[in-house]
Amino acid sequence: MGKERRDRKRDEERKGQERPRASQEQEQAVKEGEGRTGKKEQEEAVTPECKELEAKIKECEENLLRVHADFENAKKRLEKEKIQAIEYALEQFAQDLLPALDSLDMALAAVNKEGLNAQEALEELKKGIELTIDQFVRAFRKNGIEVIEIEEGGEFNPHLHEAILQVEDAKKRAGEVVQVIQKGYKYKERILRPAKVSVAK
């Protein structure tokens, strides 16, 4: 009698253990089925929007790559133009100086003409030199180079002048410019060469 009870109790315990396991498996299967169904429904609902967004993203990426390529090309082109501008910076200035060189050639050719006496040759040479100087000044002015102007009786300015002599001059006050020995030049606001002058003591 006691053995039968024990056997019955053991059988009930086994059934109790098997039932929850089976029920767990069923619940899991139901959840998976629901998950697949929900996922499928979600994909069906979002797919058109996703496709549109993906197309837009792809278009933006292509535009970005195109803009980047254009930027790199422009950068290379500007760098090349910059290098060329530096290399040929004096081209225009050289062209402006060519007429002055032509004038010197013409003056020399005029002096070497047959039949000219010394006075006539000297006059031709003087005209050629004056014309050349005038063309140099015009070429300089066109390119921003100007003579440093010094007024008669002007005060010595250490930023524009270089005093190489001090002289006695009763008509001048101390510190006044007496004579311009060599002209000075400036390029825009920069001094290329100060004017060399003599100054009254």
Image (tube, rainbow, N blue to C red):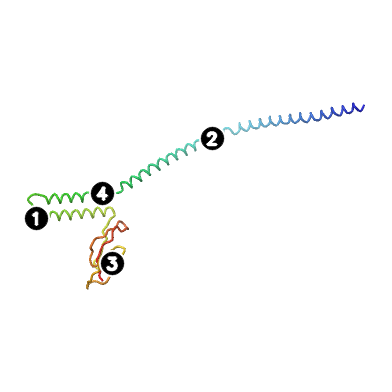
User: Element at badge 3?
Assistant: loop
Lower sequence index among marks 3 and 1: 1
> Where residue 55 appears, x then y in whole percent?
52, 34
Lower sequence index among marks 1 and 2: 2
**Is there CB contact under 8 Å for labels 3 and 1?**
no
> Where residue 165 appears, x then y in whole percent?
25, 67
- Relative to 81, residue 125 above or below: below
Q: Residue at x 22, y 54 (%)?
A: 136
- Distance CA(mark 3)–CA(mark 1): 42 Å
Q: Report the residue that reaches farthest toward the bottom.
A: 170
Lower sequence index among marks 4 and 1: 4
> Where residue 188 appears, x then y in whole percent?
31, 56
Lower sequence index among marks 2 and 3: 2
Lower sequence index among marks 4 and 3: 4
Residue 55 falls left or right of residue 99: right
User: Element at badge 4?
Assistant: helix
The N terminus is located in which quarter?
A: top right
Q: Nearer the viewer, mark 2 or mark 4?
A: 4
Q: Which residue is mark 4?
A: 94
Lower sequence index among marks 2 and 4: 2
Q: Which circle marks residue 156 in the picture?
A: 3
Q: Which circle marks residue 54 in the picture?
A: 2
Q: Residues within 10 Å of mark 1 (few under 14, many from 20)?
A: few
Q: Residues within 10 Å of mark 4 (few under 14, many from 20)?
A: few
State which quadrant residue 161 falls in.
bottom left
Q: Residues within 10 Å of mark 3 (few under 14, many from 20)?
A: many
**Is there CB contact under 8 Å for labels 2 and 4?**
no
Q: Which residue is mark 1?
A: 118
Q: Amino acid at mark 3?
A: Phe
